[in-house]
Amino acid sequence: MLRLTRNPSIVYSGEFQMTLRERLASIDANLDDVQAGVEACSRAATTLVADTAACDGLLNAPLLRSVVRQAKALRESACDQRTAMQELRNSLAELRGDLSLARRAAIRPPPPVQNGQLR
């Protein structure tokens, strides 16, 4: 659970106080870890297909087809996860941009009113 404090650059994550920049860096690190897992999954599927092909003749055809089908599903899942990871990274970059713009934006008072009309 995140809570903002009076200082908008400080947030609480659980019991830990951290800056928004630190929190975003933490999210980036977690995304990197998930992406590494997705890549490892994809490599495992490729290895499984290669090993299965090398066992030609040792395994019966239905088992071979089943392993190849499961490896293909694993590859497709890894591809979907890569797409989701990219969307998350894009959203995080957009959030960083929005926060950067908000930090630089000047806060101006409303225009003066004279005789009931805006000047």
Image: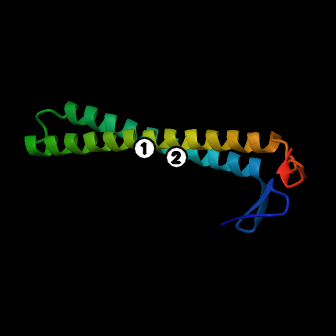
| Colour scheme | rainbow
Q: Are marks 2 and 1 in contact (CB under 8 Å)?
A: yes
| In this picture, residue 47 sits left or right of residue 113 | left
**Residue 87 on image: x %, y %:** 50, 41
Mark 1 residue element: helix
Which mark, by number, is residue 34? 2
Q: Amino acid at mark 2?
A: Val
Mark in front: 2 vs 1:
1
* Quadrant location, the C terminus: top right
Quadrant in which residue 94 is drawn: top right
Mark 2 residue element: helix
Query: Spatial distance from mark 2 to mark 1, Cα to Cα?
Result: 9 Å
| Residue of label 1 | 81
Name the foreground residue: 40 vs 18: 18
**Residue 83 on image: x %, y %:** 44, 39
Of all residues, the one furthest to the front in this rendering is 115
At 22% from the left edge and 36% from the top edge, which residue is drawn?
52
Q: Could you classify mark 1 by the number of other residues whose Cα lies within 10 Å: few (under 14), some (14-19), or many (20 or more)?
A: some
Mark 2 or mark 1: which comes first in sequence?
2
